[in-house]
Image: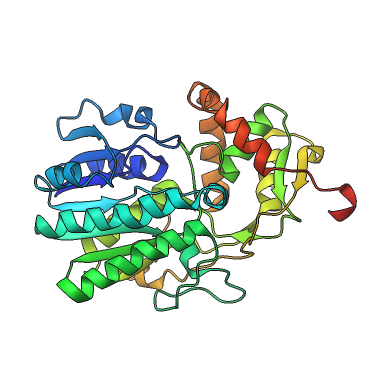
Amino acid sequence: MRLLVTGGAGFIGSEFVRLTLREHPEDSVVVLDKLTYAGNERNLDSVRNDPRFRFVRGDIADAGMVSRLATDCDVIVNFAAESHVDRSLEAPGQFIQTDVYGTYVLLEAARSAKHKRFLQVSTDEVYGDVATGRSAETDPLSPRSPYSASKAGGEMLIWAYRSSYGFPAIITRGSNTYGHNQYPEKIIPLFITNAIDNQPLPIYGDGSAVRDYIFVEDHCRGIDTALRKGAVGENYNIGFGGETSGVAVADTILAAFGKPDSLKLHVQDRLGHDRRYAVDTAKLRSLGWAPRHDFTQGMELTVRWYVENQAWWRPLKSGEFWDFYQRNYKPLPAATV
């Protein structure tokens, strides 16, 4: 395959690029990335000298650029997205521009170039809050944040292109992902880096909201499986199959460092905070995929990486990062916890 990987300098996208070049020696990869605050060219240092790799800085909403790149590729794998719920609450328009309009630009380019496959990396958050059971790929979408709504909007475009043009698209819906090279505003790298510096770990509300955390390598292997073995026109959930609360995440990290519980700080809850996500992954597992890391194993690897790579994350926790942090984490009165 000749892959165009959009958003390939981001956390999950860069892991997918590294995995592709490592495990598929006949493939080549072009990365297109806008390098917003969460995109980082350093994530691609290990493949920069690979003759099968090329990096292009640009926006997926730039139709001319996307069209030119698409003509030299067979497949687009779209990781490019504004992806943080908290930021979507502050600036929803940016999410619509990238996640919906940007997806449209990619679809048009791939259709014009007669690509063999198109894979859209989506999120389990499109299902909305899941009080009981596990979301199956056939369940209705019920997004509850501007972020998840923009991702659902991108999916709707793809469904329309499938029906209208017979467009060869596959969609994956991944659960909350963690691991190395993740921008430190997300809960796990934020808690790890704060714990290293003896700073409070801000827990939304009472900390009982649960997520199904999947290690980044396992998520990318799931995407790779769906791309190469999945059926065109299908959607595939990717998750570990466990449930971990915000408090449990904090407890795990504090225990790893031998830090006191007093570092846990309950803060005002996120607007419209979904209490639970959970996905049924039987469909993808039937293709031979299964996660290789449980939460304990994945967290050990992740904690070690942030301890050993402080030169990577410390420059990111400055300026704009702290402005955003102060706006979003406001302590709760102790009596409400």
> Residue 194 appears at what percent x and percent y?
66, 33
Question: Is residue 34 at least partly visible in the picture?
Answer: yes
15 displayed left or right of 241: left
> Residue 121 appears at what percent x and percent y?
35, 56
Task: Judge whether 212 appears above or below 156 on screen.
Answer: above
Question: Is residue 288 at least partly visible in the picture?
Answer: no
Q: Nearer the viewer, residue 23 or 263?
A: 263
**Among all residues in the image, which is located at the extreme right?**
335
- Report which quarter residue 322 is drawn in: top right
Task: Judge whether 19 appears above or below 312 on screen.
Answer: below
297 displayed left or right of 76: right
Residue at the (10%, 57%) spot, across then down: 112
> Residue 312 appears at what percent x and percent y?
48, 25
136 displayed left or right of 297: left
Task: Judge whether 157 appears above or below 95 on screen.
Answer: below
> Residue 139 appears at what percent x and percent y?
44, 78
175 displayed left or right of 68: right
Q: How many marks?
A: 0
Residue at the (77%, 43%) spot, across then down: 265
Q: How is the image coloured?
A: rainbow
Residue at the (65%, 48%) spot, across then down: 249
